């Protein structure tokens, strides 16, 4: 392969499309082959290629301290994916990027899933003005619904039967995914769903298949393989018999259980779509708490226990899978190594040490057969060998776990945005978390004040483009933070006392993660505590009846109100 150049619009567009989408969780900075030839000229390693100066990022090239002679590819993932260039010191530790011919197809390790773009069908949805919040207009037209421990299941109607490929597309159209049973506890969740809906018998499509990779079952909606030790099957299944190949998996309501069987993919069956029900920022964790009956006392010791119980080990596996630290029975290397780089890039010694720790823990975990033991051992190894780095890694990953959650029409409480993206920019994150309290940060068109108070780190400032609440949530995510949640009077009093916004912009109001729709109560997007601004500060609610709005706060004057327009001012907090 050869080092990557971004020499023309086709290459730039191709790279943007390759990395586009909410599932991209890797680095946002890569070395290219560009290099400074003289104070004002840059060139690619292939001198025949033109170096386009209009690809530079805002305020670049800057040649800070006269030492930035190499060109780095910068991927900005906000409203859309944009590939730009920076000049940086050539000694900076950063992953490389390469391009080359298509490689031979490796031995299969996952089924060949249908090729399709998973897109919603707009006529099914009511999309609110911010373009980041939507819900199904008439959900009961599509099936019957049930919530089980932070997870929603929709069973299609008796008359709605489809092939495997059609079922995948049908769930996408609803902004859901076809059922994935890669985690054992979901068989129990599903059996409870059947009981709650009085479904005694029936066969439904899941996203499971072994097409093109016989005997290796995976779930196309999650890219996860089946765990044979945690899966439950109908008698004598899978059998792959009949006139056509039985390459797709259905789940059967049978004898008060949820049991798998293999079926021809062209058979028309009912299907089950799924998603998360809760808007809580820790929903991925709470689902695992419910699955393994973890008590609050046990949860409080999860990061410190040296001898976890079998239930706690399975909880840690569940947590690791839901955060993508652990996938398909092994450490998720791209996810972990890219975040190690993001959190350790400023020190070569620390980066080398943390890479080494990850490699040792990966090697140790491979020798363990039980998946709960393996996943918990992987986390435990990191906590023993590099506790600070491991907790820093978890803290970096937590904000990136965003899921679409609001599918049903609101009745009494407003809906929060359900389509914001979260890709951390390590440069911004490092600058925010390294700054002393009271510091002013200015970078790439972003400016604001960092405050350490109330047990958290805050950033109150000006984002470089106006945005809706959904876009401001993505902005805070880019900083490795979340949009500010105010859910107690004690927190309000502490923030007012700490003067979060400094003295530079005393008359400005900052957006928070509380939204309101006309005629509905206001919702705190990252807390289940009811909205209480009016009880905790002087709050003007006069704009609440006109349109979709968010709560904004002036920390200098101790005032709050609703605002409806796209905003550039935001308040972010550490999680």
Image (spheres, grey):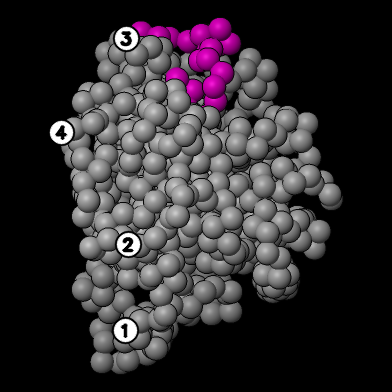
Q: Residue at x 27, y 57 (%)?
A: 264
Q: Residue 234: percent from the left, percent from the top?
A: 45, 48
Q: Which residue is mark 1?
A: 102
Query: Looking at the image, which residue sits at the far right?
Result: 306
Residue 477 horizontal side relative to residue 489, left or right:
left
Q: Residue 542: percent from the left, percent from the top?
A: 35, 8
Separation (CA) of disc 4 from disc 2: 40 Å
Earlier sequence position, callout 1 versus callout 4: 1
Magenta highlight range: 523-543
Q: Residue at x 22, y 51 (%)?
A: 267
Separation (CA) of disc 1 from disc 2: 36 Å
Image quadrant containing the N terminus: bottom left
Earlier sequence position, callout 4 versus callout 2: 4
Label ID, residue 519? 3
Q: Residue at x 56, y 67 (%)?
A: 333
Q: Which residue is mark 2?
A: 241
Image quadrant containing the C terminus: top right
Q: Which residue is mark 4?
A: 123
For residue 530: magenta? yes
Q: Secondary structure at mark 1?
A: loop
Separation (CA) of disc 1 from disc 3: 56 Å
Residue 481 horizontal side relative to residue 193, left or right:
right
Q: Residue at x 58, y 11 (%)?
A: 536
């Amino acid at each position: 392969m050869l080092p990557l150049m971004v020499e023309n619009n086709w290459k730039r567009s191709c790279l943007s499309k390759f990395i586009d989408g909410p599932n991209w969780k890797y680095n946002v900075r890569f070395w290219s082959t560009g290099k400074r030839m003289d104070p004002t000229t840059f060139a690619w390693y292939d001198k025949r290629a033109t170096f386009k100066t209009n690809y530079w990022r805002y305020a670049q090239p800057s040649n800070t301290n006269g030492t930035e002679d190499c060109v780095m590819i910068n991927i900005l993932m906000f409203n859309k994916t944009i590939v730009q260039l920076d000049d940086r010191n050539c000694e900076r530790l950063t992953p490389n990027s390469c391009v080359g011919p298509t490689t031979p197809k490796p031995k299969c390790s996952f089924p060949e899933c249908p090729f399709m773009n998973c897109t919603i069908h707009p006529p099914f949805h009511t999309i609110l003005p911010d373009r980041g919040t939507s819900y199904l207009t008439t959900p009961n037209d599509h099936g019957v619904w049930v919530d089980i421990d932070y997870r929603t299941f929709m069973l299609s109607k008796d008359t709605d039967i489809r092939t495997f490929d059609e079922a995948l597309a049908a769930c996408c159209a609803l902004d859901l995914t076809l059922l994935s049973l890669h985690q054992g506890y979901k068989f129990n969740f599903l059996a409870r769903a059947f009981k709650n809906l009085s479904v005694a018998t029936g066969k439904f499509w899941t996203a499971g298949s072994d097409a093109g990779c016989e005997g290796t079952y995976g779930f196309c909606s999650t890219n996860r393989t089946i765990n044979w030790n945690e899966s439950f099957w109908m008698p004598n299944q899978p059998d792959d018999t009949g006139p056509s190949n039985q390459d797709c998996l259905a789940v059967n309501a049978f004898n008060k259980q949820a049991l798998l069987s293999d079926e021809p993919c062209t058979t028309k069956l009912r299907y089950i779509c799924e998603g998360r029900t809760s808007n809580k920022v820790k929903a991925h964790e709470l689902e695992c708490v419910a699955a393994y009956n973890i008590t609050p006392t046990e949860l409080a010791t999860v990061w410190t226990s040296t001898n976890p119980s079998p239930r706690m080990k399975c909880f840690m596996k569940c947590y690791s899978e839901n955060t993508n630290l652990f996938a398909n029975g092994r450490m998720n290397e791209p996810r972990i190594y890219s975040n190690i780089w993001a959190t350790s890039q400023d020190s070569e010694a620390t980066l080398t040490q943390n890479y080494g720790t990850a490699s040792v823990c990966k090697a140790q975990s491979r020798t363990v057969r039980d998946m709960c033991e393996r996943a918990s051992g992987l986390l435990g190894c990191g906590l023993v060998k590099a506790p600070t780095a491991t907790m820093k890694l978890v803290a970096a990953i937590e904000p990136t776990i965003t899921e679409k959650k609001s599918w049903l029409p609101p009745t009494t409480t407003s809906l929060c945005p359900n389509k914001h993206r979260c890709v951390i920019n390590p440069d911004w994150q490092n600058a925010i978390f390294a700054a002393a309290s009271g510091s002013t940060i200015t970078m790439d068109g972003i400016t604001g004040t960092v405050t350490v108070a109330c047990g958290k780190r805050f950033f109150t400032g000006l984002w470089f483009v106006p945005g809706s609440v959904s876009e401001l949530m993505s902005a805070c995510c880019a900083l490795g933070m979340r949009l500010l949640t105010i859910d107690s009077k004690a927190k309000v009093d502490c923030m007012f006392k700490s003067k979060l916004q400094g003295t530079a912009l005393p008359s400005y109001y900052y957006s928070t993660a509380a939204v309101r729709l006309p005629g509905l109560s206001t919702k705190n997007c990252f807390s289940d505590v009811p909205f209480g601004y009016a009880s905790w500060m002087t709050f003007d609610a006069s704009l609440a009846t006109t349109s979709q709005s968010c709560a904004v706060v002036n920390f200098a004057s101790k005032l709050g109100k609703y605002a409806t327009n796209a905003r550039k001012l935001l308040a972010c907090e550490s999680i």
